[in-house]
Every structure is written in structure tokens, then in C-alpha cells.
Amino acid sequence: QKEVEQDPGPLSVPEGAIVSLNCTYSNSAFQYFMWYRQYSRKGPELLMYTYSSGNKEDGRFTAQVDKSSKYISLFIRDSQPSDSATYLCAMSARIGLTTDSWGKLQFGAGTQVVVTP
Amino acid sequence: GAVVSQHPSRVICKSGTSVKIECRSLDFQATTMFWYRQFPKQSLMLMATSNEGSKATYEQGVEKDKFLINHASLTLSTLTVTSAHPEDSSFYICSARSGGKPNSPLHFGNGTRLTVT
């Protein structure tokens, strides 16, 4: 079983709709959660990151973390064709007591999103 | 925001030759950089952690003699694929932590598409 599970899609939505993406994970030690957007043939671009459970909003993007269910989500409101990309979740755990004791990032496989005009 | 520059973006080489890929942090110093490999429709696989002034740390299964990493300064890390073979063809991406702290978000370069003929 992979540590981070993410549906690869593709997820196709009409322009203006809400895009809903999610990842589940098995390691309860994960405390640091990120979402990246990757356009074709480009490197991933950081969208949002959070340490805690709950919601975090940034413009059209909302990240949600539910540590009790080991489930994170990303919502994109008022989706645009330019949002068409692959979205990757990533997370890491603290492996020690000091501030420099974070483990390596574990990535989901990425969900391909297509927003149609 | 933090910028990580990677060069070249695309390279084609013949089997048996070596290829060098550069990764630069443009507006911040990075004592640690990370090299990833990505196959089509798959997630990022961490290959190695590049540490300024010391030897790189390789992930299990990654041949350190084949993938040479040098991190000679706080803004530059290089990955050299030695004696490349067609199976080395892939998308290689570097990243660095902008804040210099282990829990700072990772920023990625735009990747290098390597094709070995």
C-alpha cells in the first residue's frame, strides 16, 4: 500500500465549476501538507501548504486537512481552462524533536484536471 | 516568490555519453537541494539529496556512480548522468527549500527532459 493515495483522473469539469481533489494517507505522523500544480513538461508549482487540520483559503483555492480521517482536499472555485493541469499532493512527517527533523516529502501520483470551455 | 532555475530544459544525447544538468536558486541560498525523477503519468521519485559542501545522500536503488551530484555553492547543484542509456530517459527535476529551514516549502525547477538515443 502506498503511503499517499491520489486518484490519477483525468477529472473533467466545465468552466466555472468547482474542482474537488483529494488524497488519503496512511502515516499518522504526517503533519505538513502541500498541493502543487504541474503543467505539461514543467516542474511542479507550489499552490498551498499547511501544518494543521482545518481549512486554508487563498483566492480561488481552498485546502482542507482532516488528520483524524487522514484525508486532505483541494478545492478550486470558478475553474478556468488555465487550471487544466496535474495536481499533486505532498506531505511529510517530523521525525525528531528539533526543527530540522522533517522527513522527506511523499508525493501522490497526481490528478489530471481538464477544465473545458 | 522563490525561483529555482534548471538548465537545460531539454537534451538529447547518444547512448554512452554523459549529460550535466544544472539547478540554481536565483534569489535565495539553498544549503540543500533535491533531485527527482518523474516518469510519464507518475509521481516524483526522490533520487538524492544534495548537500552544499558535502556528499549527496542517495535514495535506495539509485546508483551514485551513475548519477553524480555536486553542490559546490549555496546556489548551484549539478546532476551528471554518466554513460547514459535509453532507460535513463526521463524527466529530471530539482528543488530547494526557499526558507532554508527543513519545514520551508519546496520550490521546483522547470525540469529537464532527457532523451537518450
Image (spheres, rainbow, N blue to C red):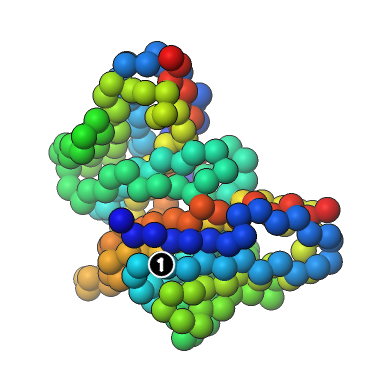
Residue B73 higher or lower than A111, as above or below: below
| Residue B81 left/right relative to B54 | right
Q: In this view, does A47 lie above or below B103?
A: above
Q: Mark 1 lies on which chain?
A: B
Front residue (pair B56, B109): B109
In which quadrant of the rendered image does the N terminus of chain B lie? bottom left
A29 vs A6: above or below? below
The answer to which image quadrant residue B3 occupies is bottom left
For the point 49% across and 39% down, the residue is A39
Which x, y percent locates residue A100?
Answer: 28, 72
Residue A110: x and y in percent read 47, 37
Left or right of A67 in this view: B81: right
Which residue is rendered at x = 66% and y = 69% of the image? B20
Q: Which of A76 and B75 is in front in this view?
A: B75
Q: Residue at point 29% right, 37% down?
A: A72
Is residue A28 in view?
Answer: no
Q: Residue A4 is drawn in which quadrant?
A: top left
Residue A25 coordinates in the image, percent (x, y): 36, 42
Q: 10 Å neighbourhood of mark 1: few (<14), some, or many (≥20)?
A: few
Q: In which quadrant of the rendered view does residue B26 lie? A: bottom left
The answer to whether residue A44 is left or right of residue A51 is right
Closer to us: B9 or A28 = B9
Whole-percent x, y for residue A65 in the image: 23, 39
Residue of label 1: B26
In what element is the residue under mark 1?
A: loop
User: Residue lying furthest bottom in this view?
Assistant: B53
Amino acid at pointer 1: Leu
Q: Residue at x 30, y 28 (%)?
A: A76
